[in-house]
Image (tube, rainbow, N blue to C red):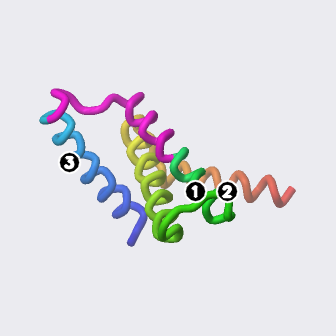
Amino acid sequence: MEFKTLIARAIAIRSKYAEFEKERYGREWTKEELMLGFMKDIGDLAKIVQAKEGVRRVEDVDNALGHELADCLWSIIILADKYGIDLEASFVKTMNELDAHLEE
């Protein structure tokens, strides 16, 4: 799947969540609340990585790791969208800068 297609899918799912939030809470999450959700996902990811390293127990750890990495990617895509960042262009630019730095 192309990255632009992944972004479009992530935004479509976020729109569904926004509708759910409006029905349940009377409003959709703010950007700050989206960031807090991302931080929770990062914490979950840290625990799963510990499980992969044998420090914690998580059932079906490989599936859990894939799921949490996808959750984190989704949050990053949504935050980029909310702040008007072209994530694909920013990623390419950043990778080019890192590569150039390593070539020095």
Give me the residue at 44% from left, 62% from top: 67
- The answer to which of 46 and 54 lies nearer the viewer is 54
- Residue located beneath label 2 in the image: 96
Q: Residue placed at 33% from the left, 29% from the top? A: 30
Q: Residue furthest front?
A: 57
Residue type highlighted by circle 3? Lys
Q: Amino acid at mark 1?
A: Val
Looking at the picture, does residue 11 appear above or below residue 6? Answer: above
Q: Of discs 3 and 2, which sits in the foreground?
A: 3
In the image, what residue type sits under mark 2? Asn
Distance, label 1 to label 3, CA atoms, is 29 Å
Q: Which residue is mark 1?
A: 92
Estimate the x, y position of residue 99 in percent, counting from the top left: 74, 59
State whether residue 23 is above or below residue 75.
Answer: above
Q: In the structure shown, which secondary structural element does the residue marked by tag 3 occupy?
A: helix
Q: Position of residue 60 (x, y in %)?
A: 48, 70
Which residue is under mark 3? 16
Image quarter in which the C terminus is found: bottom right
> Quadrant of the image for the N terminus?
bottom left
Q: Residue 32 lies in what quarter of the image?
A: top left
Mark 3 vs mark 2: which is more N-terminal? 3
Q: Which residues are magenta?
A: 24-41
